[in-house]
Structures are given as structure tokens and as C-alpha cells.
């Protein structure tokens, strides 16, 4: 595909001479534009990283300098060693965030794939009704369930515990929808053979469908991990002692506490950004497929 | 034979009864958890004190949900009795719902249950510490009172703000996303690399991006620095702006430039404030790459022979873009526009961190208002009012989702 497109773009048919000078010029121009856009989009990260090494005075000096005068590595150590009391330390917040993100993502993969299996592969009365109901819940904005969810968690004595985020996060209509579409695309001959051999649906689900659906499961895992890692409103509402904070909430408190010390806030921000960026760089294919799938096919 | 039939009918009846009781118990249990009662430590001390409270205040709610549960249970029991006779279909029923059970339980408790509760309290005055008091449609009426009374304008102003947001952000982010996608959708080296760099702002937490941008928007920040540099190039001086604290509206600024004035009672004529524009810009920055991915996926589905044919006919790249690419992207453009609008209606993180709805309410948004009314950040706790606002927002969002469906269907007819 790429070769045909290249021919079309760069050497119009019927011309013997591909005009190399113009070709190289337009190519250089295109890369220049790409690099410029890339720089603009990546600027916040570059400036924030550099800023995180600046001194208190330098960070709010005008005009701002691009590079820090002295590289203050101890900013990073200072943030790592923050202690808000009541067990509110930075490593603790990092752990809380990672723990919640992994737990929710794993549970979601399990329960969403179960539901998706029954939507995609089983036939029983009420299935389409439940499926449409699920699509309906996709439309409910988070603001509607926010307050009553908070009240419910209070009644269950789950406020300020991780359960308040894990329990409602165990399933998501979006994840189920995505997996249902994927399961439907898996050819069913293998399962029919297994069924004739007397395998149960649980066995088919576990030994046939799940191994074949590994890329889709990974996509759901990564999207949910990222969603939970980046969640803000719910943790802000549900978790309120320093030992339970997640990074995002801790950061918002940082910002209020270190009003003028933007260098420290930026360190916190980078601590938060780096794990997700790394994960994304490693698994970008799955991320991108997931977003494209959720949007285009959903 | 006859005896066997009798057995299956009897076990079918039994299964139907069990189903009915089970559904009734689950739904009533969920209703019990979500009953609109007084909260507070005394009521929550033990299960019995809570039950006593439910008995005092939430009997109508429980009866209403009970009727719903009975109808649902009756239908389900009927289905079970019908299916039970056939072993294969009986098994399908059991297996199907066992696979669905975790999803159904979680959704019923944490989505349907809480929505029933929210819907009920949206007609009451409720602050957790005392029993909800029925006020009919007062909360809904109050939301729109800002239309006549400028003192209660908060919700109307928040809708006004998101209206500007949708009007400005959505077209720009869509155009930017298409531009980015088209730039990337060419055979090239390092394509993967560029794609990752482009996408980075939308993977990161909005809290991180917002904090970095608050720092950029400081009076001594990079944005002012950039403006000062550009102005300096043409020999002008730039007065540093306090971006996130400036309530002056764009239309107001234009009017002022011509010597006019818009009084604060006519805030709705002032246009989006500078602070709000600053937040909008930041959002375009993070959402454009997200939507870029959708356009990239769609671009890859376009048949390359179309472009080959066009270039044989001598169409320029520019013409190919307008005559082939854009029309074929139409369904995705509509989808992105609607998703963008729905996202605009639900902005929260940026506002909470950067402006808390200020200055002068010019960056107030519905979700932040729901949040602060429910927690009593501005005066008394008003959970009923907050719920009413959330439902109004939901209706607006349903409306846009409905439009999306319609547009998408007409959009795909083109193929």
C-alpha cells in the first residue's frame, strides 16, 4: 500500500523524471512541519521537566530562562520525601495510585470479558434487552451518579476506603461493548468443536476465547489503567485522609500548599506523568487501537 | 412420559418462584441501600437504626421500587417457567445470566440504584443530616431562575459558559485533529515516533496538564513571555496579563475599545472571559490529539485507489483533500463534533484546579456547580438541588447523543 501511495504522491504517472530536487524539498518541508508540531505538543513536558530543576526564585522569574541555572536535583528528593502527616507520604500516594489502577483494570478485564462473552456468544431470552440497557447506561453523565454514589458509599461505610473506587469501577459499559464487538469477530468453529466434545461454556470462555482475545483484553486493561490513574473527581470526593490520597488529589493539594513553589508542584506533576507516558510509549499500539475502536466503531 | 412432564412443570414453577423472590430481594436490597433517608453517624450506627430510619422516611420510595421489582420479577419468572421445560434452553438461560451476574449486580447497585435515589432527592430539599423534604419542582425551577434574577445566575451562567466553550473549542479541536491526522497519514519514516509524540498530551492526566498550564499562565509565565517576545518583534510593549484571573469578556473588550461599556447586570453580553479562553486553549491542546487518533483510523480505511484515480485526472493534493478526504470523513467529523460537545458539557478538572469557577463566575461549569452545591462549598449543602442540576445536564447530553445517532445514521448512508 505504501509503495503505491508513494508513486502517486511523488511521481505522477506518465512522467519519466521524478524531479528529485522538488521531491527532497517537499519531503524536508513536511518533516520540518511535523517536528514543529511535535515540539509544540511536547513543550509542556519539556518546560515542566526543566522547571522542576529550577530554584524557587527562578521558577517565577520574568522573563523566564529556558534552562535552570543550577540543576537542583534535590527538588525531586524533596517531593519524594514530602510528609503531610497521617501517613501521607509521596511513595504512599504513588503506591495507592498504582494499586487502584491495576486492581480496577484487572477486575474490569475479568468481569467485562465475562459479560461480553454472554452478549457475543450465548443466546438466551433478555440478552438483547440487557445489551441495549447497557448501551443506555453509556450515555449517563458522571455528574448524575456522583452525589448519590457519595451518599451510598457513606451508608456502606466505604468512604475513605479503596473499595469506594474499586466496587463501582469493576465493570464499564464501554469495555463490555468493545470486547463484545471483538468476541463477535472471532470465528466460532473452534468453540463449536469444543462444545461437541463436551466442553462447558466456562471452559470455552477460559481456554478458547480469552487466549484468542488477548490483544483486546490488553487494550481494555491499558485504557482502564490510564483512566483510573488519571481519575480525579471521584478520588477527590471519596478519599479524604492523606494516607488514602492518589497522586492527582495529592497534586491538587500540593498546588494549594506550595503556592509559590511551582518547581515542587512540577516535580509532582512529572512523577505523575512519567509512568503513564512510559506505559503509553511501550503499548502505544493498543492504546491507539482502543481509542480508534471505541470512537469509530462505537 | 406423563410423569416426567409433570416433574418439569413442577420444577419450572419452583424455578419461577425462586427467580421472582430473588429479583424482588435484590432490587429491594438495592433500594434499601439507596433509600433517601437522614444520614449522619446516629442513623448509620447500626443496621437496625438505619432500618428504623428507612421505616420513618422512605416508605413511599420503597413501595414505589417494590412495585417496579414485582413487575420485573413477574416478567422474569414467566420467562423462566417457559424456558425451563427445554433442558438446552434452560441451560442457556442459567449460563447466560451467570456470566452477566457480576456486571448486572454492580450496575444495578452503583448506577441504577443511585440514579433512583438521585431522581427522588432532586424533588426534595436534602442535606444528609435531616430527612429529605418534598418540594415538588422547586429545584428545577430554581436552576432556571437565573434567567430573570441575576443574583441566582450561577447555573445559567455555567450553561452560557459551556455554550461558548462548545462554540469555540469544538470546531477548532476538530479542525486541528484532522490536520494532525492528515499530516501523519503519509508514508514516512519515524511515523510511530511522531504519532506517540503527538498523542502524549492526551494520555497524561488532565491534572498534570492543567497544573503545567496554570504555571504557563502566571503573570510571570511563558505565555506572557511569548506574547512579550512577539510584540517586541514588531516594536510594541506587552502588558502582562493575569490570564486565569481576568474576568473581562471578549465582546466586552471589543466594546470597550470603541469607548462603550457593558454593565455587569448584562453579563451575558460580555462573551467568554479571558480566563475562560485560557482554559479553552488548554483543552484544545489535549483533546485535539485524542480525536486525531479517530481520524487516523478513518483515514486508513479510505481506499487509496481513489487518490490514484484523482491524481491521474490531475487533481492537486489540496483538491484531493477537499473533494475526497473530507467528504469521506464526514461521519467521523460528526461523531467527533458530538463527542466534543458532550465533553464540553462535562468539563470539571481544569476548572476545579485553575479557577474554581471564578473570576466572577466566568469559568463556572455545570459539573463544578453540582460538586460544590452537593458538598456545600458555597453555603448550605444542597444535594437535592445538585441532583436536579445533574439531571438537567443529563437531559442536555441525551439530546446531543440523540443528535449523534441521527447524524451518524444519515452520515453512513453516503457509502
Image: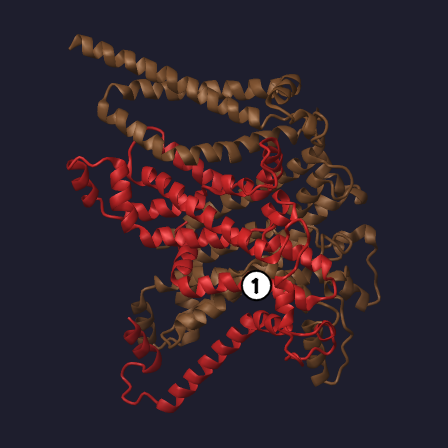
Q: Measured from the top left, where is residue A157 in percent x and y?
A: 60, 33
In percent of width and height, residue A219 lies at: 39, 54
Q: Residues within 10 Å of mark 1 (few under 14, many from 20)?
A: some
Q: Secondary structure at mark 1?
A: helix
On the image, which quarter does residue B142 sit in? top right
Q: Name the one closer to the observer, A123 or B31.
A: B31
- Apparent colour of chain B: brown
The relative height of residue B331 versus residue A67 in the rendered view (above or below) is above
Q: Position of residue B16 (x, y in %)?
A: 35, 17
Q: Does residue B141 appear left or right of residue A249 in this picture? A: right
- Left or right of residue A251, residue A218 in this image: left
Give the colouring mode of the picture. Answer: by chain
Point out the image quarter for the C terminus of chain B. bottom left
Q: Is residue A200 left or right of residue A261?
A: left
Considering only vertical position in the picture, is B328 above or below B404?
below
Which residue was labeled with disc 1?
A271
Query: Which of the chains bears the disc numbered 1?
Result: A
For the question of whether residue A217 can be seen, the reply is: yes
Which of these two is toward me, A277 or B168?
A277
Where on the picture, by quarter, is residue B207? bottom right
Q: Colour of chain A?
A: red
Residue at position x 62%, y 20% in the image: B54
- Quarter of the figure that contains the N terminus of chain B: top left
**Residue A10 vs residue B281, the one in the foreground:** B281
Q: Residue at x 38, y 34 (%)?
A: B100
Q: Position of residue A90 (x, y in %)?
A: 61, 57
Q: In the drawing, does residue B259 fall left or right of residue B314?
A: right
Please indicate, yes or no, whether residue B338 appears anywhere in the rendered image: no
Q: How many tags in the picture? A: 1
Q: Is residue A120 above or below residue A43?
A: above
Amino acid at each position: 500500500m505504501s509503495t503505491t501511495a508513494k508513486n502517486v504522491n511523488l511521481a505522477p504517472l506518465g512522467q519519466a523524471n521524478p524531479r528529485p530536487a522538488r521531491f527532497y524539498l517537499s519531503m524536508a518541508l513536511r518533516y520540518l512541519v511535523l517536528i514543529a508540531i511535535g515540539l509544540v505538543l511536547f513543550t509542556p513536558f519539556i518546560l515542566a521537566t526543566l522547571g522542576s530543576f529550577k530554584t524557587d526564585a527562578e521558577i517565577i522569574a520574568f522573563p523566564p530562562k529556558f534552562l535552570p541555572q543550577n540543576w537542583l536535583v534535590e527538588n525531586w528528593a524533596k517531593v519524594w520525601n514530602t510528609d503531610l502527616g497521617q501517613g501521607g507520604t509521596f511513595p504512599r500516594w504513588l503506591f495507592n495510585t498504582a494499586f487502584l489502577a491495576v486492581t480496577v483494570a484487572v477486575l474490569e478485564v475479568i468481569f467485562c470479558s465475562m459479560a461480553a462473552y454472554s452478549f457475543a456468544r450465548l443466546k438466551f431470552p433478555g440478552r438483547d434487552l440487557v445489551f441495549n440497557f447497557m448501551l443506555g447506561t453509556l450515555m449517563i453523565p458522571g455528574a448524575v451518579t456522583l452525589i448519590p454514589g457519595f451518599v451510598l458509599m457513606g451508608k456502606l461505610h466505604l468512604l475513605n476506603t479503596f473499595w469506594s473506587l474499586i466496587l463501582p469501577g469493576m465493570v464499564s459499559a464501554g469495555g463490555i461493548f468493545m470486547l463484545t464487538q471483538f468476541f463477535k469477530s472471532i470465528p466460532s468453529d473452534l468453540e463449536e468443536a469444543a462444545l461437541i466434545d463436551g466442553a462447558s461454556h466456562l471452559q470455552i470462555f477460559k481456554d478458547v476465547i480469552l487466549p484468542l482475545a488477548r490483544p483486546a483484553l490488553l487494550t481494555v486493561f491499558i485504557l482502564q489503567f490510564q483512566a483510573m490513574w488519571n481519575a480525579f473527581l471521584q478520588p477527590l470526593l471519596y478519599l479524604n485522609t492523606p494516607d488514602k490520597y492518589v497522586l492527582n488529589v495529592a497534586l491538587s493539594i500540593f498546588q494549594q500548599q506550595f503556592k509559590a513553589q511551582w518547581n515542587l508542584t512540577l516535580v509532582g506533576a512529572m512523577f505523575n506523568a512519567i509512568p503513564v507516558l512510559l506505559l503509553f510509549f511501550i503499548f502505544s499500539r493498543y492504546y491507539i487501537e482502543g481509542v480508534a475502536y471505541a470512537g469509530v466503531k462505537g | 412420559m406423563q410423569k416426567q412432564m409433570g416433574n418439569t412443570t413442577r420444577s419450572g414453577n419452583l424455578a419461577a418462584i425462586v427467580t421472582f423472590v430473588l429479583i424482588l430481594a435484590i432490587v429491594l436490597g438495592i433500594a434499601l441501600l439507596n433509600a433517601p433517608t437522614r444520614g449522619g453517624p446516629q442513623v448509620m450506627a447500626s443496621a437496625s437504626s438505619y432500618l428504623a430510619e428507612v421505616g420513618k422516611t422512605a416508605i413511599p420510595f420503597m413501595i414505589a421500587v417494590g412495585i417496579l421489582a414485582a413487575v420485573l420479577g413477574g416478567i422474569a419468572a414467566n420467562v423462566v417457567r417457559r424456558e425451563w421445560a427445554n433442558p438446552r434452553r434452560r441451560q442457556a438461560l442459567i449460563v447466560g445470566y451467570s456470566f452477566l451476574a457480576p456486571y448486572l449486580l454492580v450496575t444495578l447497585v452503583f448506577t441504577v440504584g443511585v440514579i433512583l435515589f438521585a431522581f427522588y432527592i432532586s424533588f426534595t430539599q436534602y442535606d444528609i443530616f435531616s430527612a429529605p423534604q418534598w418540594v415538588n419542582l422547586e429545584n428545577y425551577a430554581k436552576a432556571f431562575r437565573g434567567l430573570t434574577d441575576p443574583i441566582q445566575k450561577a447555573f445559567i451562567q455555567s450553561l452560557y459558559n459551556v455554550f461558548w466553550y462548545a462554540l469555540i473549542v469544538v470546531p477548532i479541536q476538530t479542525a486541528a485533529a484532522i490536520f494532525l491526522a492528515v499530516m501523519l497519514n503519509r508514508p514516512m519514516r519515524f511515523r510511530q515516533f511522531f504519532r506517540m509524540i503527538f498523542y502524549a498530551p492526551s494520555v497524561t492526566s488532565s491534572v498534570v496538564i492543567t497544573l503545567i498550564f496554570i504555571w504557563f499562565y502566571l503573570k510571570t509565565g511563558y505565555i506572557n513571555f511569548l506574547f512579550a517576545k512577539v510584540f517586541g518583534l514588531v516594536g510594541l510593549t506587552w502588558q502582562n496579563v493575569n490570564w486565569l484571573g481576568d474576568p473581562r469578556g471578549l465582546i466586552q473588550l471589543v466594546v470597550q475599545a470603541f469607548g462603550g461599556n457593558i454593565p455587569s447586570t448584562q453579563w451575558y453580553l460580555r462573551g467568554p472571559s479571558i480566563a475562560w479562553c485560557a482554559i479553552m486553549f488548554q483543552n484544545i491542546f489535549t483533546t485535539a490529539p485524542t480525536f486525531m487518533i479517530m481520524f487516523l483510523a478513518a483515514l486508513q480505511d479510505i481506499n487509496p485507489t481513489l487518490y490514484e484515480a484523482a491524481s491521474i485526472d490531475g487533481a492537486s493534493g489540496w483538491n484531493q483533500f477537499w473533494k475526497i478526504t473530507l467528504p469521506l470523513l464526514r461521519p467521523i467529523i460528526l461523531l467527533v463534533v458530538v463527542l466534543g460537545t458532550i465533553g464540553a458539557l462535562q468539563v470539571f478538572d481544569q476548572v476545579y484546579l485553575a479557577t474554581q469557577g471564578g473570576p466572577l463566575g466566568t469559568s463556572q461549569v455545570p459539573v463544578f456547580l453540582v460538586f460544590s452545591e452537593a458538598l456545600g462549598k458555597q453555603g448550605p449543602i444542597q444535594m437535592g438541588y445538585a441532583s436536579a442540576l445533574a439531571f438537567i445536564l443529563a437531559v442536555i447530553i441525551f439530546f446531543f447523543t440523540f443528535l449523534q445517532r441521527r447524524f451518524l445514521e444519515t452520515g453512513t448512508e453516503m457509502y
